[in-house]
Amino acid sequence: MSHSPDAAASPAPEPAALPEPAPPAPVRPAPRAWLARCIDPAIFVGLVAGYVAALLSTVRDLGYSRDEGFYFHAARGYGKWFRMLFSDPEQALTRSVLDSYWQENHEHPALMKSLFFASQHLFEKVLFDDRGTAYRFPTMLLAGLAVAVTFAWGRRAFGRAGGVVAALAFACMPRIFYHSHLSCFDLPIAALWLFVAYAYQRSLDTRRFSWALGCAVLYGLALDTKHNAWFLPASLVAHLSVRHVLALRRPWRGWYRLRIPLALVLMPLLGPLVLYAGWPWLWHDTWPRLVEWMRFHFQHVYYNIEFLGHTYFKPPFPRSYAWVMTLATVPAVTLLLAGVGGVAGARRYWAARHREDGPHSDGGPLLWLLCIFVSYGPWLFTSTPIFGGTKHWITAYPFLALFAGQGFVWLRSVLEQRGAALAGRHRAFGTRGRALLGVALAACLLIGPATMTWHSHPWGLSAYTPLVGGAPGAATLGLNRSFWGYTTGAIQETIDEHSGDGARVFVHDTAMDSFKMLQKDGRLRSDLRPWWTVSGSDLAIYHHEQHMSRVEHMIWVDYGTTAPVHVGAFDGVPVVWLYQRPSYQPRREP
Amino acid sequence: MARAEFPALFRGLVGRASAFWRAQWQLLLVLGCAVAGLLEWGLHVHFSRAAPAPEEWVALRPTVQQLLQRGTLIVVAPRWAEPNARLAFGDDWMPLRHVARADDSSFERALEISILGQHAAELEGWQLESELDTGRFLLRRWTNPQPARVLYDFMGQAQPPALSVSVEKGDAREECRFGKAKVSNGDLHGHPTFPSPRYTCSGPDWLFVGRTVIEDQNYQPRSCLWAHPPARGELVLRFDAVPIGATIRGYAGLPYFFERDEQGSPVDLAVWVAGEAVGHYRHVDGEGWKPFEFSTARFAGQLQEVEFRVMTARPWAREFCFQAEVR
């Protein structure tokens, strides 16, 4: 067992299968009790505030993605209904009014879009100048909370330092950082999946009704966020089953006595109720609309996505997609740490299992593992769409980060053990030396992910890890360079520079509402006219995807040039470029 | 050392290494993870600076100018960096007919601009003339050992008086008028650009002949003559006074974005010289940009009329496009 100062202050069980215990650290005066109690909440709050601050400081040059445009529009519509609910509730609750407002974008539940509206309504011009930022704030807040909850769980499972490393490992995944900015549902469902799993684990550990109730309510919120939540119970049920099987001892009596946790009883009761309450679209024709919702996602159209130089647009899709893309986009050292943590956790569990007094709760690793498997599970089938890149399985990433935290704790305990041996020979090397070693180790493990993540902005979806040669290597391998048309934000100043008054700008893959939000926020000039087609436009934006090259060819023939006037490149790799019709003479009023 | 001692020495080394690993594997793993973290960081820094930025391509322009001769094909390796080159060198050096070429066989010279140690596979077999390493870029001048001699480029001559276009149904013949027409295009799911000028036939707006660009099976650009077959009859492209050589050679296809669904009828292209059929090409969906070559040796040296006749059984979304040359 390790005896680092932070672990001593933590109530967490120490990793049992770790190397032999180091000698006790020299006794030092205990900090004041209240200060000790404040440390973890302070870290929790600091992580939330720090991550949200990082997101807010970088939000303004991240363009609005295609889907955000649709959700802005839907949120505006829902907002009108909420206003009516307060001014004329009787009218607002009539079926025709309900359906007319909530029909929009009813392929996705309402929670996040309602929060986007609420945030815009409450915070625009109060906290944020930009309307788009106000819309995006709920996701940022959830992202900050997800980082902090990763810390909280890690702290409980293996100590404070490991918790911090887990939280930072999660925060410093480039794709997580990108999605954390967006008023979309991918990061929110990852956060809520984590919250549900954490509440479930706490309900098992504490056997408190409040945690079980919280788990069920959170599950309802997850259902009301995105359809990934349909799969979440599978991980909990699998966890229950595996735990039950692992707890059996010869002669296997009582194998059929499966004690179902209260949280699992409450989830199917309260979860759908929360979904129903939070999604007015379901208040009429509930069952047919639920079926329609499920059918939409189980029979989703296949979009195009490039993978290893080939554009996939229909099944069968490559089974390797999810794994290769994970390797290509999650820092390798985080994956390595997670691997170490997984093995260390398994060894620890195995060692405890063979002791009569071994722990009956593993503190989480088994649940983390199952959440990872369930998150990736759909991509074992070659019929599951892969067009979403990594965002469809990012629900697994907090759990990968937790394993990484566990891996760090194991590595640090080895260092401490060696440090203790060293301390025996050199008086100078004591508690402080071991702490320094731990910090140095954490720095070695986190500097890469942190640098990569910061560097990836505002090109999040174009960022790849060194394992595939970074962005240039990924382009050479033929991995998708970006999607959703959000990189318009990365060349917004250039568009303004090349445009005369009232210029018609072909927006390509940027949704009209996303483009208009850039104008609303003053990031693009308001006199520019977004244009649907290349013909008739003065300037044309081109967002590169392999199958979209045909749009660039249209521009060449229409404009009579193959030369862009600007290329927005990430690490030298062209991602978005701008054409100007050669005959167009931009005129600007002084 | 005696020869017999070597296995013992080897066993000893393995034994010591094995013992060291057993004693120190945990520490080695710690060091390995820390080194992996630092290595990944270092590699990230390296890769993030490895490829030249667009500004560096622009700065390369004077160097490239010194190496270029008229008609030189600029080839970029890797291909994904080509937009940077087009930004830097413009239409004069990278015109549409080069960028959306059918193949490289008729070019005499090429300038390969290579980064990241990449090489353009299409220049395999060409002869290296000179090489200039500027640090970030490797510029290689290549000569084609056997450049194809093009006697007549049908796409380049697709205008009056060389070309006349008509739709023929049995004995009925309806001429298509050449002139300026409204340019149109779709978005991702739309049609390629309908150019101006073009030969406009009566009927739907897609019934015309004009130069456009479609994407091949690798989503690469191919410049070609749009020749959507009519609902009934044949679309006939008639070129007058064509100097005939050994072959008529070309490529044909449909925009791959639609062709890949493999739901359309085959499209037939018949080539006639001096009123005699010399070849027939059938395009089936999914084949992509596909070559054809017909012998015209028996007319070699003559000036003759050449007809391209395009037809299909079911004209739905048959956005047929072809390119041809006399060689």
Image (cartoon, rainbow, N blue to C red):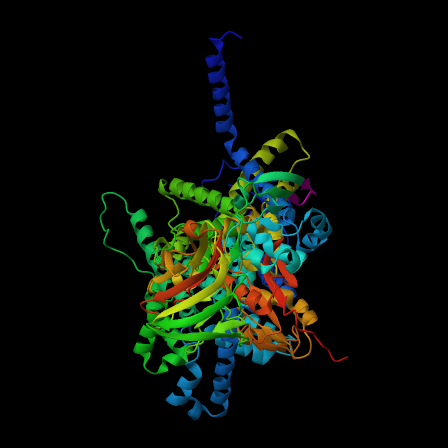
Residue A388 visible in the picture: no
Q: Quadrant of the C terminus of chain A?
A: bottom right
Task: Give percent across and percent down for residue B148.
Answer: 52, 47
Residue A433 x/y as whole percent: 65, 39
Position of residue A444 in the picture relative to residue A210 (left or right) = right
**A587 with respect to B1 (left or right):** right
Give the left or right position of residue A429, taking residue A360 as reference: right
Q: Which residue sits at x=56%, y=53%?
A: B80
Where residue A58 sits, quadrant-wise, is bottom right
Is residue B135 a member of the stretch shown in magenta?
Answer: yes
**Residue A462 on image: x %, y %:** 56, 57
Residue that appears at 25% across and 43% down: A250
The total number of labels drawn is 0
Is residue B132 or residue A458 the one in the foreground? B132
Residue A324 appears in view: yes
In this rendering, the answer to whether A487 lies above or below A31 is: below
Q: Position of residue A84 (x, y in %)?
A: 49, 89
Task: Write the start and end of the magenta stretch as one range.
Answer: B132-139
**Residue at 46% over, 17% down:** B11
Find the residue positioned furthest to the top: B2
For the residue pair A551 and A450, the one nearer the viewer reads as: A551
Q: Is residue B30 above or below residue A51?
A: above
Q: Quadrant of residue A172?
A: bottom right
Residue A362 belongs to the span the image colors magenta: no
Q: Relative to the observer, which residue lies in front, B188 or A367?
A: B188
Residue farthest front in this picture: B302
Q: In front here: A557 or A454?
A: A557
